[in-house]
Amino acid sequence: MTWGEPRGLARFHPAQMAYGGAHGYEEEKRALEACLEAGVDLVDTAAFYSGGASERRVGELTQGRDVLIASKFPSGLRFGADDFPRELEASLNRLGRPNLDLYQHHFPGRVSIPDLMNHMADAVETGKVTAVGVSNYSAEQMRQAHAALAARGVPLAANQVEYSLLHRQPETNGILDACRELGVTLIAYTPLAGGMLTGKYSAEHRPTGFYRRVLPQYRRKALDAIQPVIGLLREIGDRYSKTPSQVALRWLIDNPIVLPIPGAKNGTQATSNAAALSFSLAADEVAALSDATRAWRV
């Protein structure tokens, strides 16, 4: 979300304010190289991130690389279905690519879902988009999108929503069930709960950054409440010589219809994230983590 060099008001994008700015071109390049070396070949971005600077940086770094690119539209808050062709061309131009591997509607808003899916099916037919996805769609909105695309012979590939051990609402609001029923991958954003599952934060060590200092989940009471979860992550991680964040990612990866997309601002973070691919959790460990975080299902 913070890659690239945003200009003007884009410097105050919520992600920039919450997580701090990017670590620069060289570290972003190291992050990509670390991912590719570990077999991670999907990069997710969005037109909205850093005012388009993220797409431009992803495009620069991935030229000539065998990488899958996923992006999201629109670039701003005002959007109608008929704006889709313009948004797609703008993203392709920023990325410097003739097509996108996965193109996702970022927020449902008030747009006509059937009309928008027809535009997306058109893009698939012309070869500018390979797979169609949505983001932040409810179960009912997913079904609308799936039906509209199916009428054109195009599958709905993914719904990108927040999902982690500390944000388990997809299990109770019907989204995960709908994904299973429709054959849709749930792409889990913020899979480390904004850093809360890394074990870095506690009531004594609160995060920096303006937004994270004021959000309720980073207050002392909330940070105290997650310490038993962090303890369990450490305990399980010690068995595999893994960190709490790697175990938290693995809990998602071990669900066959879930694909977590942890952020990385530098090579060190990317290497740490990718290490979640090098082990698997036992069934009883998955169950223990699920039981320990049951309160976060609502």
Image (cartoon, rainbow, N blue to C red):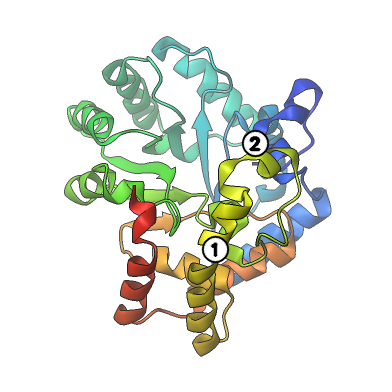
Q: What amino acid is at disc 2?
A: Glu
**Residue sitting at 36 percent across and 79 percent down?**
285
Q: Give the residue drawn at x 30%, y 20%.
A: 113
Residue occupied by mark 1: 40
Q: For residue 157, which quarter of the picture?
A: top left
How far apart in space, not on screen, are marks 1 and 2 (Cα)?
18 Å
In the rendered structure, find residue 55 and report the number of the disc placed on it. Answer: 2
- Crowd rating for badge 2 (residues with CA inside 10 Å; few <14, some 14–19, many 20+): many
Q: At x 55% / y 34%, what residue is drawn?
A: 98
Considering the numbered disc 2 on the image, is that residue within a helix, a strand or a loop? helix
How far across and down, in percent of the image, does residue 79 sit? 48, 13
Percent x, y of residue 242: 57, 80
Q: Position of residue 65 (x, y in %)?
A: 63, 54
Drawn side of residue 246 relative to residue 167, left or right: right
Question: Are there few (<14), some (14-19), or many (20+) residues within 10 Å of tag 1?
Answer: some
Of the pair 16 and 146, the residue shown nearer to us? 16
Tell me the SS state at disc 1: loop
- Look at the image and tell me whether residue 7 can be seen: yes
| Identity, as a three-letter code, of the amino acid under mark 1 | Val
